[in-house]
Amino acid sequence: MLMTNYSFWDRPTRFLHLGLAATVTVQLLVSLWMVGPASRHPATALEHAGFVVHEWVGLCALVIVLAHWLWSLQSSGDAGIRHLFPLDREGRREVLAELRVLGSGRRVEQGPGGGLAGLAHGLGLLAVTAIAATGGVLFVLLSGFRDNPALTHTVAHLHALVSNFVWVYWFGHVGMALLHQFRGDGVLRRMFSLSKD
């Protein structure tokens, strides 16, 4: 087993992760029943309420995503950009070493150390950024700030396309977290405990 020395992620990262986990989960679930203004059939009150919730929770998600980027850009170490995108020589070596460990049937210890888990978090942050950004643009376009049906249609399709990646990431991320938790790694307690660093 490739071991990493860690205990907890830093407190701001845990707050941001909790905010993203909550808003993205709500967004995905609400998207299953909401009906937007471009629908071909009239929305029921529940479907319309779902769309309104989706808009406002989406704006909250956008703020959290932007805060996460600001925190990651100014942070060093386990909360920084190198953790999310280990693309320098050392980071690539760490990712490749962890892939070899996984390929040999052993497990890689998870935590704030970076490597493959950090890269997965970085790719997830990119997907969530894309969906929050396109949602923010749609909010502006649909609020009547600028009447451009062609642009609205294009951005809506891009938003729907990116949502597929976010769904895949959500299931994969939650699934891996639960797998680690059930194997006794305590990853959920370490990520969601806000009481200590």
Image (cartoon, helix red, strand yellow):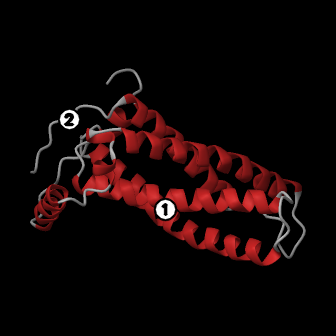
Q: Is residue 15 left or right of residue 64?
A: left
Q: Is residue 75 left or right of residue 160?
A: left
Q: Position of residue 99 (x, y in %)?
A: 17, 64
| Displayed quadrant of residue 193 | top left
Q: Which circle's residue, 2 or 1, is located before the other in the chain?
A: 2
Above or below, comparing residue 141 to residue 194 in the picture: below
Q: Quadrant of the C terminus?
A: top left
Towards the viewer: 169 or 15: 15
Q: Secondary structure at mark 2?
A: loop
Q: What residue appears at the point 33 percent right and 52 percent down from the top-left corner?
A: 84
| Displayed quadrant of residue 146 | bottom right
Towards the viewer: 47 or 86: 86
> Which residue lies under the disc numbered 1?
127
Above or below, comparing residue 96 to residue 112 in the picture: below
Q: What residue appears at the point 34 percent right and 58 percent down from the top-left corner?
A: 120
Q: Are marks 2 and 1 in contact (CB under 8 Å)?
A: no
Q: What residue appears at the point 46 percent right and 66 percent down from the top-left corner?
A: 168
Between the residue at mark 2 and the residue at mark 1, the CA separation in whole angstroms equals 27 Å
- Residue type at numbered disc 1: Ala
Q: Position of residue 62 (x, y in %)?
A: 60, 49
> Which residue lies under the disc numbered 2?
6
Q: Is residue 63 left or right of residue 180?
A: right
Q: Position of residue 50 (x, y in %)?
A: 76, 53
Q: Secondary structure at mark 1?
A: helix
Residue 11 in view? yes
- Residue type at numbered disc 2: Tyr
Other-residue count near label 1 (Cα within 10 Å), few / some / many at <14 / 14–19 / ≥20: some
Q: What residue appears at the point 42 percent right and 52 percent down from the top-left corner?
A: 174
Residue 33 in view? no
Frontmost of labels 2 and 1 is 1
Q: Position of residue 183 (x, y in %)?
A: 24, 46
